[in-house]
Amino acid sequence: MRSSSRGQSRPGCLILPFALAARAFTPSRPGRVTDGTTEAIQVLRTAVGIAATMWLLYAYPLRQSAADFATDQAEQVFISAGVLLIAAPVALGIFVAAARPPARSVYIRRLAGPAKGFLALFTSVLVLWGLLQDSAGARMAQQLGMWQIAFLPLALGAVLFAVPYGLTAVVLCVHYVFRAADVHEVLPALLSPVLVWALFAFQMADSAPVNAPATVRALFLFAPPVSVSALSIWELRCLRRRFGITVRTALRGGTGGP
């Protein structure tokens, strides 16, 4: 019995950063309206995008090393998170300010969800920067003298926790648009096109990662923002037809779930 309990605790520790990141960045407002069809189409779009990218890498040679390509893809995710850090607060502020007073107070209370996401991401990035920037953690340990024996394991544990947590947080905050659905169901559909077209602008400035024909490069460049925008329109349409939720009703006091 003892060996069984120990075996179960190890995977729990390993998935803890991912579980905490999911809890911090997944919308959790009670009564939030969700549409299973829209979510299924979004998952399908992501799967098709991944499959198309794998085919592109298989069919055409890379202009850079695989490590550099992976780094560029990671940078795009971080750029997306950075765009959200700027766009999401502005959009949420405009939405709350434009709402009528009875609904405005409800939306202000619901800002706690996105605020937790911002705080969680900022904290994880701050921890990583403080421990890894120019070996700051190692220099701090040297200044502690004999206490570095206790500091180094704690610092290593913090890094091992913050790295998977931070990477998961960045991916989830982009996927869930910083929990904007906790404020109102229409907000993710409004913010997602802003995010992908901003990322499109960054990609326009970079050279293509593969030696593919111009038509193929253009297809892979325009497909993500166009498909996300189309899905956002579809989501808004489904909210209107199935649940009677529109941007206009949201601003007039249709606050969605409780």
Image (cartoon, rainbow, N blue to C red):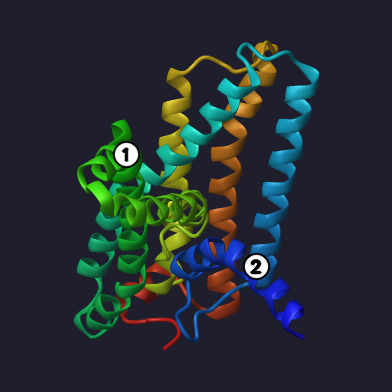
Q: In the image, residue 58 lies at what x, y percent?
A: 79, 23
**What secondary structure is marked by label 1?**
helix
Q: Report the disc number at residue 160.
A: none
**Residue holding disc 1:** 138
Is 23 or 176 nearer to us in this picture? 23
Q: Is residue 253 above or below residue 227?
A: below
Task: Give the CA separation, mark 2 to mark 1.
Answer: 28 Å
Q: In the image, residue 201 lies at what x, y percent?
A: 42, 28
Quick check: 56 left or right of 81? right
Q: Which amino acid, mark 2?
A: Arg
Number of numbered discs present? 2
Picture residue at 37% right of the left edge, 81% below the top: 255
Residue 116, quarter of picture = bottom left
Is 208 or 115 nearer to us in this picture? 115
Q: In the image, residue 143 lies at what x, y percent?
A: 20, 43
**Residue holding disc 2:** 10
- Which quarter shows the N terminus? bottom right
